[in-house]
Amino acid sequence: MTKFSRRSFLKSTAGAAAAAGLTNLAAPALITSARAAGTVKLGCLFSSSGTMANIEGRLNHVVRMAADEINAAGGVNGSTIEVVTSDPASDWPLYAQIGRQMLQQEKVASLFGCWTSVSRKSVLPVVEQADGLLFYPLHFEGDENSKNVVYVNSPPASSVLPAVDYLMSDEGVTAKRFFMLGSDYVWPRTINKQLKGYFKSKGIPETSWKEEYVPLGFSNFQTLVNQIRAFADQPGGQPVVILTTVGSSIPDFFREFINQGIKATEVPVLGLDVVEADLEGLDTAPLVGHLNCWAYLQKAAGPANEKFLKDWAGYVKAKNVPFKADVVIDPMVSAYDSVHLWALAAKKAGSFEVPQVRAAFDGITFDCPSGYKLKMTAENNYVYRGVFIGSVNEAQGFDILWQSKDEPKPIPFSPYG
Amino acid sequence: MIRPLILGWLFAVAVATGASAQSPGRAELIAGLCGNAAATGDAGNRILASAGQPDAAELPWMETVTSALLDRQLKCAADPGQTVVDGGGAVRNAVTLEPASAPDQPKVPVLNLKNRAVFELAQSALRLRVGATPSVRRQALTALGRKAASVPVEVFEQAAAGESDAGLKAEIESTAQISALNSPDIAKRIAAVERLASTPNRRVQTQIAALLADPAYKSDQKFRLAVDAALIKVGQGILLGDVLSTLYNGLSFASILFMAAIGLSVIFGLMGVINLAQGELIMIGAYVTWLTQEALKSIAPGLADYYLFIAVVPAFLVTAGIGVLLEATILRHLYKRPLMSLLATWAISLFLINLVRVSFGTQNLQFLTPFYISGGVPVVGDFIVTWNRLFAIAFAAITLALTWFVVNRTGLGLNIRAVTQNRDMAGCIGIPTRKIDMMAFGLGSGLAGLAGLSLSPIYNVNPQMGGNFIIDSFMVVVLGGVGTIGGTLVAALGVGQVNVLIEPLWGAVAAKVIVLFLIIAFLQWRPEGLFTAKGRRR
């Protein structure tokens, strides 16, 4: 068990500084670990600097927390888990570089990491070449099925489409027109491509949607919100915004949206990557009613969630983690699930070797804090899980507006792409 | 057994105490509000319909429970009689509004968007009828005006009849005309069209354009003329609004660019030091603003709303202090080695980012949004003046004036200009060039701190925020011509406006690329930038 001591903290900070500085130069020794013998190593690829730091950074701590939990219960196959963290500095190629280093030099049994799809795509050839395992905790665009990646969160068919269906239903807002606004990279573009295919299959005319992209880290949304207002005022039925911007572009967008006086009841925003952490620093009273969809929301009912929330609060306090103790987001829970799924599979396989662990995925289940029972099958490395639609409330959180009855079967390749 | 009796009695009392016969019973309504989505929506529509009844006695109660539901202060119990309104510092029974105790494990209803729209409308309608002050009623009227066609016309009629404020009464009557858009009386329809056209925007244009397909448009010449005239008028209004809006957006972006670049312009212009830590000084300015706000919250909560003005002094002084410190300890020794100073400032920027990260964490800082920077006001067409942008524009204008004054009208400014133009000669006539360097670096850093302050209501404040500005600000400084305030201003205005013009046509990604390309092309033609100070580098 690696302690998150001041020393390792300083080390990781120094590493982060080096990583930020030497992005495209030779990789410095920026992976931090303290012990080697009698343990099994798990590697984290989550940035604690750069544009993704605010949301990705907390996942490192969740992985440690899950590992601590498993170690406290006796470890896996007689070994204790040691978590190796890094800082890829929100620099996509650096994820691959550090991932390779972790697999080859640190000999980690599995990697846990990536938020954006572009970072996953950059790590993909590395894990495939080395036959490693990467647990990916974000919901994403699908259309990928590697035996070396465990897709812990949902592909669009079981997350985005149910939410869009809800908006189009009479129970939702009977949405007829769609303004798709995203950051310019693979996830938003693929999601929007699939959505357009889906709209076509529903007989919605092409004039009913509009697609706009902004560079990563973009923040000057004045003109775009003007465009949304103009789009919303045209005839043809209820407009909605499907927001696939990421990172700091999310709060910047909402701030401009509020200031131009658009209410959720006039033009609702379905924010596909919006989590509680994105609302930190915003006055959410004018945002009440906007939507998101995830496989976990903090308000999920059930003892598993109560325990998780309590454990996280305790962990933050005990380890002096620089994140809020009372904010838990889906990718945190998915990262936590990932470690447990890996441990269950490793236990079942009686080995840490990737082929054995992968073969053991078939049939393992885990009680997720969301209240749903996660399940994996032999068919692929996708995970069965439930879906929530959340509605922004005035306390910078989300209320549960709708949740799925059971865990829909994950469909890797969208028929609408 | 007893409970239904009590409910029945309450219902009877409610009816007896003045609620008219068609007004739904209180307990029944509360049961609806606490029910499933369909029941809630139904209750909402009934409240909206009741808002137009002549008898206003029951309306204040409806307003209370509607607002409680919207603000999530309605705590539902299994029995509607036990449901409470938990807000405003008291727990009250939802039916009687008498003090009560909260039920065990209450259910707090979450409104879906469809129902939320109904209740927002109902709340405004009720407030228009029974709002305590004219300003509350006027606010409600503005909200209703946007959806006047879906408000029962009786709401406006009754509200106008009961209104004591003469000005507001006229406004209500004017808004009420809109709801007659689909009435059988053609004269009323024409009045409605004319009233709509008096506030031109795209929403109105859509509404009026829909009338082109109306049978009356073909059959009635007067109506046709009115609709055509209204469409022309609305079209003109929208055009004017769009032009103003583009100018405003450009000006607002320019103000951001200008604030980010002005400090750099002073530093780069004077010393030729490429200060890569400039973005981080902006970030520190924003953090100082936040600290000021936190300090005010604990020391003088009454002044906390004015933190943006109060923080001007500390934000400037702290960042200027850091600038002076950096100059005196590090950069001073590197003037002869420009590449080294570039690397050194980069290292400083990384150090500052991580220092802030370790001490504050990576999360976005939470700023108060005082009344003077929240929301906006519609001007003409679809042009809305948003206060936070206006604040940034005004702040940039004042900063520009002050910087110009310091550089052109003070002794320090005279020395700075002298050193910029010819360092050796300035030294020969006794100007302490080293000291001037230090002061100028401080000035440039302090201006970056002010930039952080003015940007905090617009951008997210976190340790990484500085990186967003560094490229843009270099672009502006180089384009404007090194070391001239006027050049920086003109370049910021130009880049901002061009960006805003391109964005709607080809998207934000292309806008960035095209602007960069234009700047490169321009610098090929005029490598010195727009304006050039005659200086030592010639």
Image (spheres, rainbow, N blue to C red):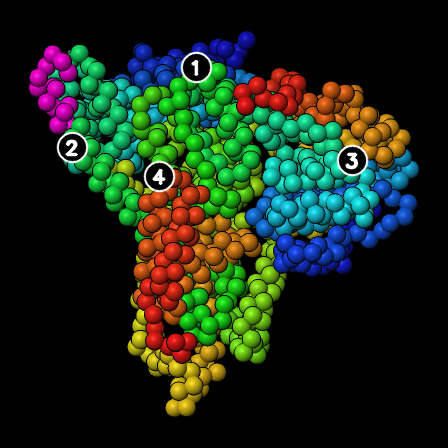
Q: Classify residue A372 by image quadrant.
A: top right
Q: Is residue A57 visible?
A: no
User: Magenta span covers which residues?
Assistant: B217-230
SS for tag 4? helix
Query: Residue at coordinates 36% horizontally, 48% vertically from top-left?
Result: B499
Mark 2 or 1, closer to the camera? 1
Q: Which residue is mark 3?
A: A131
Left or right of A409 on screen, residue B333? left
Mark 3 or 2, closer to the camera? 3
Q: Which residue is mark 4?
A: B505
Amino acid carrying mark 2 in the image:
Lys
Q: Classify residue B269 by image quadrant.
A: bottom left
Q: Does residue A353 sit above or below B349 in this rendering?
A: above
Amino acid carrying mark 4 in the image:
Leu
User: What is the x, y in percent for residue B339?
Assistant: 56, 70
Q: Which residue is mark 2?
A: B233
